[in-house]
Image: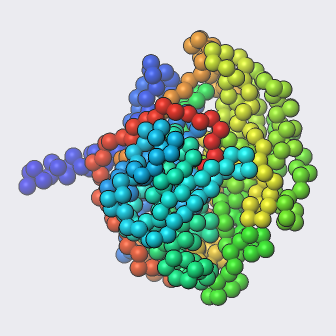
Amino acid sequence: MYTAGLCTLFSLLMSSLVSGLPVRVVNGGADLRDENGARRRGITLPMKGRAVVKRNVEELLVGSIGLGDFADVVYTVAIQIGNTTTAVNLDTGSSDLWVMSTSCQTSVCRQSNATAFSVATFQSTEANVNLTFGDATTGTFAAGPIGLDNVTLAGLSLPNQPFAAVDNTDNTAVLNGGAGIIGLGFPAESTIQNEVVAQKFNNPSTTDDFISNINTYGPFVSRLVASGVIDQPLFAITLQRDTIDVSGSGKITIGELPAGVDNSSITWVPVRLYDPAEGGLDPPTFASNESYPLRWEVPIENVYLDGKQLANSTIPPNGVPSSFVSALIDSGNSLIRGPQDVVNNILSTVSPPTLPCASAHNLTYQIGGRLFPVDPRDFIAQAENGNASTCVASSVVSTDPPSVGTLFSWSLGDPFLKSNMVVFYYGNLTHPSVDPPRIGFRSMVPTNASALLDEAVSVASQDHGNFESTVNVAPTSSEVFEITVTSTATTSAPSHSMPPIDRTSSQNSSASVTKPHLFRSCFSIVAPVVYLSFLLVF
């Protein structure tokens, strides 16, 4: 009895120490910063725990885990597929899960140091897939058979999750800390779900088949949402900064807002819905008036550079009428991509072709009536090693104009996400009008960001002219909480200030979720890699 009591006490103490955030290590004891800009030194362990909230009847889940970061180029998260634990790139710009298998012998697979998927537990669906990523100038592919296996992310597990065991790819995602990609986008953009549903039903399948099987064959987090087992149909991402001025904490929280974040501090904006004429899904017969989201895309009102509003692009879209300007929020994009004429205006203003590293510029996006800047520390990059005085604005590049199926003008990647906490709310996946999807934004840029850039330049000048840079490996420890709620909860009316919790019957299903223990003794890490690709988009 006494032994059991001690073990229980030990488990409670340990569960308060392990939060799934990465251990922050910087060579030589270099300074670290918290999210408010205060400096700290050495190794830090999160010391924050949360009690299980008890309400009434229904048990729902929330999971969280820290992120890996390879020099701010790739952000990875640990995942278990079958018997294989590896890291994959976290990508809000795509919808499919794929991982290189031990059968992949392409150049990038042979160079990869990530753990490849072992096909021992792979259940083939007899379907194959060829996934494409990037734009016209940075396109890559990943191809292979589609199978089913048990998948665990952030301590949340689903059986029979569809994914691609890639045996042929040129995607550099496998070279920078990950073995593939987990897409967190909407089902409508899931090629894997489409292929599996077509294989199981009619080829080609109907929209009715596709929408009705999100809970069975949809993307991982979409299945969690459709199954109704997480507390709220959302996930939140914060990204750490591992270059210029090492600071911040990278984390994904699935099922509720991160601990300590109040909804009143978040600006909510509706996600763009696509009609069939714009490249969207044909509505199913059981929801004939619905329009569906394709990706995490929101309207933006204006763009500012150093407080001056920039003119909108005059480049016409391809094959679609001009409407409002929108932006894709894409964690799989290591840059900010925009219209060629607007980007040229930005670069010619601040960087012809270089700029002083200590010159703080503010690229700001007006979204939902509020301003969300890119931190000046995330706007620049060192022009050459050993020179902390001369930089380039290499984080901003041009991209394709809007076209059918891709109506966004901007793709706001990691520089934007390092500067802002972003919350992705799915709403109702089968009937979006009941509970529309939206994205929430909260600026993380400290008021003294310009001074922090000056200090980082000063520190680099004293360190042989080189800025701070480090690598965080993807931790595998995670937090999982069971939250008990009343079984008589009703759907709230849609609101731009507070995302409702939608537990309507249209999303309920028989899909099961494995409930992990609150504390999981898992301290292994995914080995870091030594290869870097600077212009990366998935």
Residue 22 sits in which quadrant? top left
In this picture, residue 126 sits left or right of residue 444: left
> Is any atom of residue 516 visible in this view?
yes
Asked if residue 195 is positioned above or below residue 108 in the image, the reply reads below
Give the position of the N terminus as an image quadrant.
bottom left
Residue shown at 66%/34% (left/top)?
378
Considering every residue shown, the one lying at the far bottom of the view is 285
Residue shown at 60%/18% (left/top)?
466
Residue shown at 29%/52% (left/top)?
520
Q: Can you give x and y, in whole percent of width and height, for residue 403 in the image?
A: 79, 61
Q: Can you give x and y, in whole percent of width and height, for residue 212 in the image?
A: 54, 81
Q: How is the image coloured?
A: rainbow
Q: Can you give x and y, in whole percent of width and height, for residue 377 in the image?
A: 66, 31
Considering every residue shown, the one lying at the far left of the view is 1
> Is any atom of residue 458 visible in this view?
no
Nearest the eye: 422 or 181: 181
Residue shown at 44%/71% (left/top)?
125
In this picture, residue 343 sits left or right of residue 248: right
In this picture, residue 59 sits left or right of residue 348: left
In this picture, residue 112 sits left or right of residue 138: left
Q: Can you give x and y, in whole percent of width and height, for residue 192 in the image?
A: 54, 66
The number of callouts visible is 0
